[in-house]
């Protein structure tokens, strides 16, 4: 959590525009998802990833508590695998060490379909390099996401209420 509530509120309301780097990432993301839908595979440089029944941009939401609704939009879920697509200079390992994947694990568990693992596919356009990190599902990762939500939900609720968003 960065503590930048103003940016969080704008993003929640979809009132932000992507910068040039973010737009490049969004364009690549769209291209990759289109390839998966059309061919059930993704080729990133010299790596080939195959899919069986991909659910692209899988949206999940659940009531977390009386105060909180948790939502996520997962790049791709295919059977028991969460796929997350990244581009830019931050490595897949760095992304894997953040809170996003545990949060997705929590959402999928709440849906009754906990995954086996997640794979973060990262392409660095500047270096023309691909790296992939696999994260196995665990209750410890789900608990870390639950703890994060519990830690910040009151603060976020109060802030959004003060802005008349909620």
Image (cartoon, grey):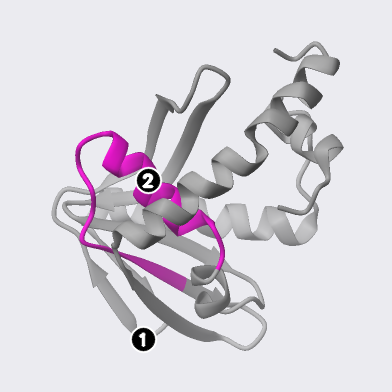
* Residue in the picture at 64% in, 72% down: 88
* Residue in the picture at 75% in, 38% down: 8
* Residue in the picture at 43% in, 59% down: 84
Name the image quarter holding residue 112: top left
Residue 146: assigned label: none
Between the C-alphas of marks 1 and 2, the distance is 32 Å
Residue tagged by mark 1? 46
Residue tagged by mark 2? 106
Residue 23, horizontal then vertical, whole percent: 69, 53
Name the image quarter holding residue 113: top left
Q: Is residue 56 visible?
A: yes
| Residue 116 lies in the magenta-colored region | yes
Between 111 and 119, the residue placed more toward the observer is 111
Q: Which residues are magenta?
A: 98-121
- Lateral position of residue 67 relative to residue 62, left or right: right
Q: Secondary structure at mark 2?
A: helix
Mark 2 Cα shell of 10 Å, populated few (<14), some (14-19), many (≥20): many
Q: Is residue 13 above or below residue 91?
A: above
- Lateral position of residue 107 relative to residue 78, left or right: right
Answer with mark 1 or mark 2, whichever residue precedes in sequence: 1
For marks 1 and 2, give the one nearer the viewer. Answer: 2
Residue 64, horizontal then vertical, whole percent: 46, 28
- Lateral position of residue 64 relative to residue 3, left or right: left
Q: Secondary structure at mark 1?
A: loop
Residue 73, horizontal then vertical, whole percent: 45, 40
Q: Is residue 163 above or below residue 73?
A: above
Q: Is residue 148 above or below residue 62?
A: below
Q: Is residue 31 visible?
A: no
Position of the C terminus, as image quadrant, is: top right
Residue 33, horizontal then vertical, whole percent: 39, 52
């Amino acid at each position: 959590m960065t503590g930048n509530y103003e940016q969080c509120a704008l993003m929640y309301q979809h009132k932000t525009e992507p910068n040039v780097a973010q737009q490049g990432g969004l364009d690549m993301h769209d291209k990759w998802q289109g390839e998966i839908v059309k061919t059930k595979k993704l080729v990133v440089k010299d790596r080939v990833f195959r899919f069986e029944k991909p659910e692209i941009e899988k949206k999940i939401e659940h009531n977390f508590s009386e105060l909180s609704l948790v939502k996520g939009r997962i790049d791709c879920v295919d059977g028991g695998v969460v796929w997350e697509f990244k581009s830019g200079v931050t490595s897949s390992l760095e992304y894997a060490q953040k809170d996003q994947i545990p949060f997705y694990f929590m959402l999928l568990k709440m849906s009754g379909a906990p995954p086996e693992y997640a794979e973060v596919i990262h392409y660095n356009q500047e270096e023309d390099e691909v790296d992939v990190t696999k994260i196995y599902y665990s209750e410890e990762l789900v608990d870390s996401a639950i703890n994060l939500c519990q830690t910040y939900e009151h603060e976020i609720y109060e802030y959004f209420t003060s802005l008349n968003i909620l």
